[in-house]
Image (cartoon, helix red, strand yellow):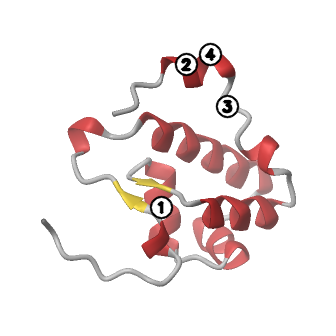
Amino acid sequence: MREYQLSTMERTSTIVEDQCRVAVEAKIFGKRVRQLRIAAGWTQEQLAEAAGITTTYTSDLERGTKVPSLTIVLRISRAFRISVAELLRDFTIDTVRRMPFA
C-alpha cells in the first residue's frame, strides 16, 4: 500500500487505488465539477481557493481518482454557490441503480 501525504481536508476522501476499477461515482462527480468550473470561467487554482482545498486535490476530483467526502461536496457546492442537489444532479435514480457498488 502506498503512503500519501494528504492535507486535513483530503484525508476525508477515499483514494481510488486501483485505476482499473475507478469508482463510477468518482468519474461522474469529477465530470460535473469540471463542467461547473469551466462554466464559471475558473481555473483549478481558483476553484481550489474558493473551496478551501488544494489544486492537486481539485485535479484528482476532476479526473475521478478520488471520491469526495460530504464535507468536500459541501465546500464545492458553497464555492459555486449552488445547492448540493444541483452539484449532484447527474446522480439520477437510473444512474445510481446501475452503479456497481462493491
User: What is the three-letter code of the residue carrying label 1?
Assistant: Ser
Give SS at disc 2. Answer: helix
Which residue has dot 4 on it?
94
Which tag, 4 or 1, sits closer to the chain's start? 1
Residue visible at 38% across and 52% down in the picture: 65
Q: Nearer the viewer, mark 1 or mark 2?
A: 2
The image quadrant of residue 45 is: bottom right
Horizontal side, residue 36 vs residue 10: left or right: right
Q: Residues within 10 Å of mark 1 (few under 14, many from 20)?
A: some
User: What is the three-letter code of the residue carrying label 4?
Assistant: Asp
State the image coordinates of residue 70 (x, y, percent, origin top left).
63, 59
Which residue has dot 3 on it?
90
State the image coordinates of residue 36 (x, y, percent, origin top left).
72, 49
Q: Residues within 10 Å of mark 3 (few under 14, many from 20)?
A: some
The C terminus lies in quadrant: top left
In space, the residues marked 4 and 1 are separated at their CA atoms by 27 Å
Q: Nearer the viewer, mark 3 or mark 4?
A: 4
Which residue has dot 1 on it?
59
Give SS at disc 1. Answer: helix
The image quadrant of residue 89 is: top right
Tell me whether circle 2 and circle 4 mark residues in contact (CB < 8 Å).
yes
The answer to whether 68 is drawn above or below residue 44 in the figure is above
Q: Residues within 10 Å of mark 2 (few under 14, many from 20)?
A: few
User: What is the three-letter code of the residue carrying label 3?
Assistant: Asp
Q: Residues within 10 Å of mark 4 (few under 14, many from 20)?
A: few
In space, the residues marked 1 and 2 are separated at their CA atoms by 27 Å
Horizontal side, residue 41 vs residue 64: left or right: right
For this rendering, which residue is in front, 45 or 93? 93
Which tag, 3 or 1, sits closer to the chain's start? 1
Which tag, 1 or 2, sits closer to the chain's start? 1
Give SS at disc 3. Answer: loop
Tell me whether circle 3 and circle 1 mark residues in contact (CB < 8 Å).
no
